[in-house]
Image (cartoon, grey):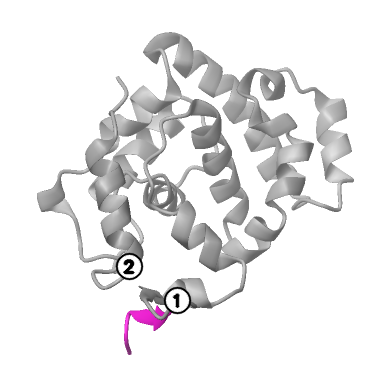
C-alpha cells in the first residue's frame, strides 16, 4: 500500500491525513513544524494524554472546547485549579470527561511550573530530547523511540502523569522534534526548511 494519498492540489500527502476532513489542514500547517512556545508544548502534551485510548480525530474535533475549558492551557492558571474546577470539567460535555486525565492536566501544570523554574522554559527541557538524525527510524514505522522512552521516564520521575513513551513520541512527531512526514509527502520539505531555520531553545 502506498504511504501517500493525493491532496486537493494533486500533490502527495501522508496517507493518514486522508482519514478525516479536518486532518488535512492540521497535517499541512501544524504537524511536524517545530514549536518552542511553552504554552503550545504544554497544550499538546495534555491533548496527547487525552488521546490515550482514543482517536486523534476525537481530540482534534474538541480542541477548541479543551482550550476554553483549560483556560487556553495557561500553565499558571491551571496550576491553581481546585477540586471545584475538576468537578466543573467532569460536567463539560465539550471535552473528554475522564477524571484521571483531567486531574493529570492539573497535576502536570504544577509539575511544569516547577520544571520551568529550574530550566527557564519547558521548551529547553523538551528540545534536549531531539534525536540525532542518524538514530531516526523510517518515517511512521515506529510508535516509540529511545528518546521518547527517556523523556517519558524523566517526566514521570518529576511526577508527571499520562506521559507514556507512545504519548511522548506522538508529541515529538507533532511538535517537530522529528520530521516524520513520509519521503514523498509535499509537506516534508517544508518541515525540513522550518526545522533548519528553527532556533533551538536552551
Quarter residue 127 falls in: top left
Camera-side residue of 107 and 119: 119
Quarter in which the C terminus is drawn: top left
Q: Is residue 3 located in the magenta-colored stretch of the structure?
A: yes
User: Residue 7, percent across and down?
Assistant: 45, 77
- In this view, the mark in front (2 or 1): 1
What residue span does the magenta drawing correspond to? 1-6
Q: In the picture provided, is 195 more to the left or to the right than 65?
A: left
Q: Earlier in the sequence, mark 2 or mark 1?
A: 1
- In the figure, 119 relative to 107: above or below? above
Q: Is residue 101 located in the magenta-colored stretch of the structure?
A: no
Q: Label 1: which residue?
A: 9
Which label number is shown at residue 186? 2
Residue reaching furthest to the left: 134
Quarter residue 140 falls in: bottom left
- In the figure, 178 relative to 121: above or below? below
Residue at the spot x=49%, y=78% of the render? 8
Q: Secondary structure at mark 2?
A: helix
User: Residue 139, percent across and down?
Assistant: 27, 65
User: Residue 158, percent across and down?
Assistant: 45, 24
Residue at the spot x=58%, y=62% of the render? 56
Q: Secondary structure at mark 1?
A: loop
Amino acid at each position: 500500500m502506498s504511504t501517500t494519498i493525493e491532496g486537493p492540489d494533486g500533490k502527495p500527502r501522508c496517507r493518514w491525513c486522508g482519514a478525516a476532513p479536518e486532518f488535512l489542514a492540521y497535517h499541512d500547517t501544524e504537524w511536524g513544524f517545530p514549536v518552542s512556545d511553552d504554552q503550545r508544548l504544554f497544550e499538546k502534551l495534555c491533548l496527547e494524554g487525552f488521546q490515550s485510548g482514543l482517536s486523534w480525530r476525537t481530540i482534534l474535533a474538541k480542541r477548541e472546547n479543551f482550550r476554553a475549558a483549560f483556560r487556553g492551557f495557561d500553565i499558571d492558571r491551571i496550576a491553581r485549579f481546585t477540586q471545584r474546577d475538576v468537578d466543573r470539567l467532569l460536567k463539560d460535555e465539550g471535552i473528554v470527561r475522564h477524571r484521571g486525565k483531567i486531574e493529570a492536566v492539573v497535576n502536570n501544570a504544577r509539575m511544569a511550573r516547577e520544571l520551568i523554574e529550574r530550566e527557564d522554559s519547558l521548551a529547553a527541557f523538551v528540545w534536549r530530547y531531539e534525536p540525532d538524525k542518524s538514530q531516526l527510524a523510517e518515517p511512521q514505522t515506529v510508535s516509540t523511540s529511545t528518546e521518547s522512552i527517556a523523556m517519558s521516564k524523566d517526566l514521570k520521575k518529576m511526577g508527571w502523569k499520562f506521559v507514556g513513551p507512545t504519548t511522548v513520541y506522538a508529541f515529538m512527531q507533532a511538535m517537530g522534534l522529528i520530521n516524520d512526514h513520509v519521503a514523498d509527502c509535499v509537506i516534508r520539505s517544508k518541515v525540513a526548511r522550518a526545522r533548519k531555520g528553527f532556533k533551538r531553545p536552551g
